[in-house]
Amino acid sequence: MHLRLLHVSAIALLAACGTGPSPTAASANNAAVEQSAPAEATRGSHEFTVSEVATFSTPWAMEFLPASGGRNANMALVTEREGNLWLVDVTSGQRQQVSGVPSVRVAGQGGLGDVVVHPEFAGNRRIYLSYAEAGPNETAGAALGYGTLVIGQGQPRIEGFRVIWRQMPKVTGNGHFAHRMVFAPDGHLFVTSGDREKMQPAQDMASDLGKIMRMTAEGEPVPGGPYADRGGRAAYYWSIGHRNPLGIAFAPDGRLWSSEMGPRHGDELNLILPGRNYGWPEASYGSHYRGGAIPDEHAPRGFEEPKLWWTPAISPGGLLIYTGDLFPRWRGNAFVPGLSGQNLVRVELDGERAREAERWGMNARIRAVEQGPRGEIYLLEDGRSPGKGRLLRLEPRR
């Protein structure tokens, strides 16, 4: 596929997004929350190029395959919400559909979701998929499983797919599945479980909804979890009180971070700690869509404060913590893609602190952000019609 190269700067990207009121960011450290002026994209002097790699229908997530023995270099897996999985060569834009994907319930926000590879992929060829699956009586819930990726032998395919976790209980509705995944440095798997737009179950220790889960690579609860003494489903829970956490990533220092969609505004970037309650729906810096305030107080009521929050909303769709070499100034920074904000936000992390540093208007809903094998940054646009979701590559301007 021919790659279309667009030379842009931070200023040009901002102009492409149009004018409007500047969003407000705030940072929280321990119990104190301080309002701060937003970081403006026009401050950014770092210019980069944006090139179009490929187009998809409604792309949701991507993951690069680890290069091994000269194989898999520049090969990535891309999911489409409609239930398709693609193997993409990002150097050429050529793609092949992967067969063996599980049956997916496609409705509302539900469909095929995240894709990650096992830390020992070079030996076991194992990939993990998350998705929405149908339940009885028009219910649905998130699920995840793994199988063996076979490539280089005809059509790419997944063999032996098995489900290892199902979000319980299954409920009606088609929103807030979350189901983002990340492997920890110790090999355990973390999974975000949205509140399914039911709110109160986020505080219910017998419901998976509104939690961040920790499990083994085989889907079993890890012994000694922060809520293990409560028994039952709580053995999986790492943290509670979440709404729709659509991004999760480990920083180089081992800290776990998550980006989370708030209600009407109040989107959050949270430092995820074991056994902590992040307040939803009892506390939020947003308000209910149908009107009605939500108390702001977090720490005074025993809830964790977000380290960064946005009002107006940006609708964070994912999370990347950059570790590459192409943009050395950005190592250790978090990148948050905005759906309603149609932007990409750079956040400087300093231990437990977070500060918005830059944002670039992208003139499109950005669903996901991923780091390439050379340190490039890749974005997935959230396509609203077939063929309109682009895979974009960001590289330093030479």
Image (spheres, rainbow, N blue to C red):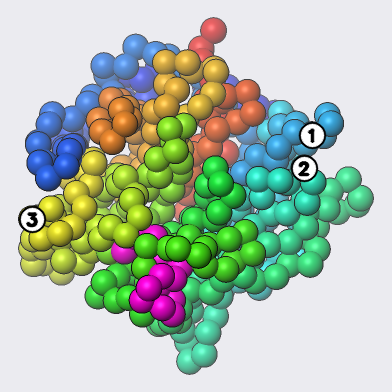
Mark 2 crowdedness (10 Å alpha carbons): few <14, some 14-19, many ≥20 = some
Query: SS class of the residue under badge 1?
Result: loop
Give the quarter of the image for residue 44. top left
Three-letter residue code for mark 3: Pro
Point out the tag, 3 or 1, that comes first from the N-terminus.
1
Point out the tag, 2 or 3, that comes first from the N-terminus.
2
Residue with the mark numbered 3:
300
Furthest-top residue in view? Answer: 398
Point out the tag, 2 or 1, that comes first from the N-terminus.
1
Instruction: Work out which quarter of the rendered image holds the C terminus and state it.
Output: top right
Q: Where is residue 346 drawn, in percent x and y?
A: 35, 29
Query: SS class of the residue under badge 3?
Result: helix
Q: What secondary structure is the stretch in magenta mostly built from? A: helix
Give the quarter of the image for residue 43. top left
The foreground one among 366 and 2 is 366
Image position of 203 (left or right of 71): left
Segment tinted magenta in the rendering:
228-240
Query: Is residue 324 in view from this perspective?
Result: yes
Give the distance between the C-alpha atoms of the residues marked 2 and 3, in whole angstroms.
Answer: 48 Å
Image position of 226 (left or right of 153): left
Q: Do the CB atoms of the residues marked 2 and 1 lie less than 8 Å apart?
A: yes
Q: Where is residue 369 drawn, in percent x and y?
A: 49, 39
Residue with the mark numbered 2:
122
Q: Where is residue 74 drawn, in percent x and y?
A: 71, 32
Magenta segment includes 335: no
| Residue pictured at 51% horizontal, 27% vertical | 323
Three-letter residue code for mark 1: Ser
Count of numbered circles in the view = 3
Residue 68: numbered disc: 1
Query: SS class of the residue under badge 2?
Result: helix
Three-letter residue code for mark 2: Ala
Magenta segment includes 237: yes
